[in-house]
Amino acid sequence: MNKTDEPVYRRLYLIERLPEPLEPKSSHLQIFDNYILGTRLRLRLVRDPATKAWTRSLQQHIEMENAGCGVTRLFEIHLNDAEYAAFETFEGNEIRKNRYFHEFDGVSFAFDVYLGDLWGLNTAKVEFASLDEMEVFEPPAFAVFDVTNDPFFLGKNLVGNKFDDVRGRVSQIGRNTPPAATFIED
């Protein structure tokens, strides 16, 4: 289903690690997001390690007015090799992550494990069909903090940050907000 230009309703949670039964070797996608400075655009490369297939796209996220970071519109154009090559000069503001998918209690989640300078940042994202569904959703047990409306955790704002910056932001959140759940000890 092509969701281009439809409102996207989502919640974003910080998680300590991938929840069971997921583990780093589980099936996942490799995502390379290159944010074009001064714009709302990003080049996205997605590689499926299982098939070695690549998907290339140009995406634009537009935040809906007065709706917070959890409600956006996504415009996406799929690119062929030649089209993507024309945009490669914009590469360099890259964020890399591995994305895992799993369903918990009938709800589909996307889990991102960030790589490179952001290694240690792990998030869980869930999308909804409506704003009402999003607003009544109860956070899962593996959620540490709900950062849906914290602009720091938008991809474009993570560019250039390191995990120590994330740790600093989490420290601020921890002082100001009770956690959505407590850590589960191994």
Image (spheres, helix red, strand yellow):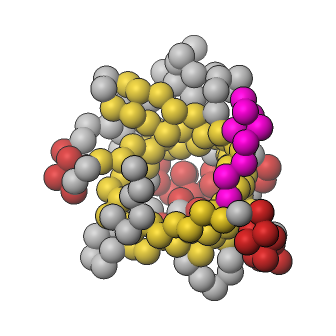
Image side of residue 179 versus residue 95, left or right: left
Placement of 23 over or under 35, stated as above or below: above
Verify whether residue 52 appears in magenta. Answer: yes
Question: Can see residue 167?
Answer: yes
* Residue 73, quarter of the rendered image: bottom left
Note whether 50 is above or below 9 in the view shown.
Answer: above
Q: Nearer the viewer, residue 106 or 50?
A: 50
How many numbered marks have been drawn onto this rendered protein structure?
Answer: 0
| Image coords of residue 145 (percent x, y) | 43, 44
Q: Position of residue 95 (x, y in %)?
A: 71, 58
Horizontal and vertical percent position of residue 182: 42, 29
Q: Residue at x 78, y 53 (%)?
A: 117
Check the image and name the residue furthest to the bottom: 38
Residue 59 higher or lower than 141, as above or below? below
Question: Is residue 75 left or right of 68 when viewed as pictured?
Answer: right
Closer to the camera, 146 or 176?
A: 146
- Queried whether the magenta region covers residue 60, the answer comes back as no
Residue 65: image x %, image y %? Answer: 30, 79
Say which of 91 and 115 sits in front. Answer: 91
Q: Residue at x 59, y 75 (%)?
A: 41
Q: Residue at x 65, y 39 (%)?
A: 29
Of 85 and 145, the residue lying toward us: 85
- Asked whether the viewer can see residue 164, the reply is no
Question: Picture quarter containing residue 161?
Answer: bottom right
Q: Which residues are magenta?
A: 48-56
Which residue shows up at 57% across the image and 14% down it? 186
Whether residue 45 is situated above or below residue 182 in the rendered picture: below
